[in-house]
Structure formats: C-alpha cells, structure tokens
C-alpha cells in the first residue's frame, strides 16, 4: 500500500505544530521518522492513526485521498499503530489482550484452550514465543508488555504498521527478535513506519529516513548517505561535540549499602554499595531482576531477606532516596494534571502554611525547576503534562524528585523515548548532580548509555549480580557475555 502526505498541518488552539509535512512511502519499505522531542513526530503518528484530526493538507492511500477521522477509519484502511505508551489491560491475560473482541467460541462460550493456542501462535509468528499467553499482562516486565503490544497490532494483518519507539526498553535477544520481525514484515510487503531515537538501529533497519524539526521535514535521506552525527545535526540544528560528560573524580563516602538482598522469584543475594559523587550502571536482560531490584530498593515492593531496601516509599524518601520509574506515563506522572502540580507531588506535605498548601512556594519551586532543567515550552507550568513531549515529561518526573533533596537517585530507563539532544541534556544534569555529591544508580537496556554515562557497571543475570566492571575500557560484548552466560 502506498501512503502519501501532502502539506499536512496541525494546530492546537491556534498554535501550529505541523507546518506542511510531505512524504511518501511504498509497500515493503521501512520508513524511519526521526526528530528531537517536540519536533512533531507524535502529532504526526496520531494523525495517521486517526486519533487526531489534521488542520489542513491531504492523506492519500494507493493514490486516492482518504479521511482518517477516527482510529476505526485508520483500521479500515489497514493502518495499525503501536504507541510508545502501553495500552494493555494489566488485569487481563496476554490471551485476553491479544484476542479481545475475537475469541474463538464453542457452544456459545469462549473456547479458552483454542484461545490460548491462537494467542501462542500469534506470539510465535511475531518471534515472541518466550511469552506465556496465560500470564496476566500486568505481571510482565515492561519490555515483554511492549512485545505483546506489537503482537496485538499484528492480529488483523495490517498493511501499514506504525511503531513508536518499539525498542526503547528492549535489549539482547528481545531486540534481535524485534529487528527480525521488522525485516519479515518488509518481505511480506507491509509498510513499516519506524519511529526511534536509537539512530544506530534506524541506520541498520530503514530503507529511507525522514527527519523532522520544528514540525517540518528538513531532510529525506537513506542510510548509506548519512550518519548518526549528521542526523543529530539535522534534528537538533547544532553539532553535538560530546555526548557523555568526562569521567568523575574518586567517589566519596557510601550513601547506600545493599547486603544479601533477596526477593523470591525475582533476585537473590544481591550486594553492592553506591558512593557519593558516583554514577553506577545496572544492566541486565529482561527477566534478570534489575527493575524489580530497583522497586525493592525504594520500598515499592517487599524483600524477603537482606539489608538496603526500605519498608515503603515514604521511608525511602525520608532517608533521601528518589526513584524515577521506567513507566513515566503509568506511575511517574498524572498526565491530566498540570506540570506545576506534577512537580509538587512529592513535596506537597512539606509546602504547607498551617492546614493549607503554600501555593506561592509551590509555584516558585516548580518555576525554578522548569528553568533549571530546561523544560519546554518555557511557560508550561499550567499546561497538562500530557501536552509535553516525552523528553520534557521525563524532565518533569526528574524535577519532582529533585525537589525532595535526595542523597541517592535511582533512574530506571531515564532516556526511554528521548531524542539524542535531550539525552545529552539529561546526561549532563545527572553528571552535575553526581558532582554535587549525589549517588546515582542508572538502570538502562541501552548498553552504549550504560558504559558511556557511568563510572562502573553492575551486571545482573537470572536474578543474581554476576559482575562488576569499570565502565572505562569495558566493551559492550564483555557486558553481554556476563548478562547471557
């Protein structure tokens, strides 16, 4: 199916965010769309998905102009979208999420054995056969939930598949399974629109690359004619001289000691320490227990043995521990609330004047954080958080925790769905915090990030801590060897 956009425009309350976007794509092509946060990628995806009405322009499918007024219209034309933010029903099983509305029946009742077989076949076809369809979706790690989202989009065999940051939480064999699926879909004649901030994979997978900046197409190119450096320059409008800050001096005193920490079925006998002024990476594949460990360190999940965890988040906060979760939309933000109110969520008990919240102080605190972290747009305090780009939403989550004055900062996938220019900003912020005496634990599925932004790396495999490496001089292969051994 050919897809063409002509002069597509979109405005919100009279402010135009897409300024006449043009591009065309053909069947059996992987078309990558890249751009900084706020470039208009999400708006464009929602228009193609029927979730947003464009303000002007035309969309053509197979040479005919079409109207995509609702998601149903997009589905009728064979367009399916897998959004960056998860939409599964966590209380339902994988099977129920995949087959919702199309269950096989027997004698008028749902044929559950047949349903589970059908779900298993769908997962196998997508290359995600490691997922048990009977598992409740909410019990799966975020990476596996992302796989289920992709498999769900394939149920109706789409002609166009839009993938929004599909690899953001995947690593190792899971990442390879995604790449294999994209190549398989291309061979079957499906048009794949691939949106990602991971430029290395874009150059590896894409046939063509569309670069957006400030709501406009500034370049259309091919992998063989460009590079990561050039794409970043086009996206950011400037050259990034250095991605990761230089190494820090020797760390200070221990800020967090973990000894023999265990949680049945998740991880066993984990011991390490974090020191002031140090950034420590934590890497592991899906199922290694890394995110579960982070939750226990913050008291968000109970532990069975060992020291270093907390009885609950309130105790952790009082001890000076802050936790930026990997799921910013689900547990990091209240998307319908204003940026100001989100930033104040962790400190509303301490900004009181008698029985009332000191609104003036809350406003000052939020405005100060917006300026300090460079949250965009600059006057966004009153906007609902859902209106911000993914990178700026992540800065809001970071801002609310920095207001607590932490001594230890746990970052779980802090750059998920964030463009390279914003990543550089986040790396510099974290480096500044470490230089100010903060101890940082950075959990990431991006090996380049784990080695580039940290001083040392802890490696988890099947619930155990199996290695500790100095980041400088360590290769990605050396980390992976320990993670998959």
Image (cartoon, rainbow, N blue to C red):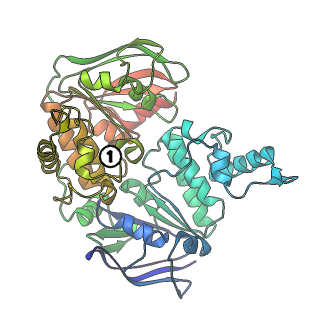
Residue 344 vs residue 71: left or right?
left
Residue 361 vs residue 138: left or right?
left
At horizontal 14% and vertical 37% (from top left) the residue drawn is 432
Q: Which residue is mark 1?
A: 415
Which quarter of the figure is the N terminus placed in? bottom right
Task: From the top left corner, tell me how far across and down residue 97 is, in percent.
Answer: 62, 50
Using the rendered view, name the quadrant where residue 236 is placed: bottom left
Residue farthest to the front, as pictured: 355
Q: Secondary structure at mark 1?
A: loop
Query: Quick one: 111 or 262, which is closer to the camera?
Result: 111
Using the rendered view, name the quadrant where residue 217 is placed: bottom left
Residue 120 vs residue 428: left or right?
right
Residue farthest to the bottom, as pictured: 64
How many marks the image carries: the answer is: 1
Residue farthest to the right, as pictured: 107
Task: From the top left corner, tell me how far across and down residue 22 is, in percent.
Answer: 38, 80
At horizontal 34% and vertical 26% (from top left) the residue drawn is 313
Q: Is residue 286 above or below residue 164?
A: above
């Amino acid at each position: 199916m050919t897809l063409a956009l002509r002069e597509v425009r979109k405005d919100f309350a009279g402010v135009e965010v897409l300024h006449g976007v043009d591009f065309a794509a053909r069947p059996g092509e992987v078309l990558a769309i890249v751009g900084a946060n706020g470039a208009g990628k999400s708006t464009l995806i929602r228009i193609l998905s029927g979730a947003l009405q464009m303000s002007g322009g035309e969309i053509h499918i197979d040479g005919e102009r079409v109207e995509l007024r609702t998601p149903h219209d997009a589905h009728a034309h064979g367009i399916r979208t897998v959004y960056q933010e998860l939409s599964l029903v966590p209380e339902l099983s994988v099977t129920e999420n995949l087959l919702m509305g199309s269950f096989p029946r027997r004698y008028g009742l749902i044929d559950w054995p047949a349903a589970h077989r059908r779900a298993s076949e769908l997962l196998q076809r997508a290359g995600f056969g490691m997922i048990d369809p009977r598992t409740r979706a909410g019990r799966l790690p975020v990476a596996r939930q992302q796989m289920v989202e992709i498999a769900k989009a394939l149920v109706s065999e789409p002609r166009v598949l839009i993938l929004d940051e599909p690899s953001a939480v995947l690593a190792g064999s899971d990442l390879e399974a995604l790449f294999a699926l994209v190549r398989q879909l291309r061979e079957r004649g499906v048009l794949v629109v691939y949106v990602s901030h991971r430029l290395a994979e874009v150059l590896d997978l894409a046939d063509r690359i569309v670069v957006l900046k400030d709501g406009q197409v500034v370049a259309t190119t091919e992998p063989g004619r460009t590079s990561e450096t050039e794409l970043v320059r086009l996206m950011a409008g400037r050259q990034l001289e250095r991605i990761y800050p230089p190494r820090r001096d020797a760390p200070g005193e221990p800020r967090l000691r973990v000894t023999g920490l265990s949680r049945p079925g998740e991880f066993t006998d984990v011991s390490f320490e974090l020191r002031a002024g140090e950034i420590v990476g934590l890497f592991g594949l899906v199922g290694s227990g890394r995110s579960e460990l982070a939750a226990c360190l913050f008291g968000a999940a109970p532990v069975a043995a060992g020291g270093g965890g907390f009885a609950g988040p309130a105790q952790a906060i009082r001890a000076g521990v802050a936790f930026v979760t990997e799921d910013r939309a689900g547990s990091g933000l209240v998307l319908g609330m204003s940026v100001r109110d989100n930033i104040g969520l962790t400190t509303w008990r301490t900004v009181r004047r008698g029985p009332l919240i000191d609104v003036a102080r809350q406003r000052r605190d939020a405005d100060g954080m917006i300026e300090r972290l460079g949250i965009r747009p600059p006057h966004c305090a009153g906007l609902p958080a859902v209106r911000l780009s993914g990178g700026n939403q992540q800065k809001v989550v970071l801002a609310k925790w920095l207001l607590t004055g932490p001594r230890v900062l746990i970052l779980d996938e802090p750059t998920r769905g964030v463009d390279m220019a914003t990543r550089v900003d986040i790396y510099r912020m974290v480096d500044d915090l470490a230089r100010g005496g903060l101890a940082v634990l950075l959990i990431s599925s991006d090996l380049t990030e784990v080695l580039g932004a940290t001083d040392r790396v802890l490696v988890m495999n099947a619930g155990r801590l199996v290695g500790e490496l100095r980041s400088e001089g360590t290769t990605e292969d050396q980390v992976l060897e320990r993670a998959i051994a």
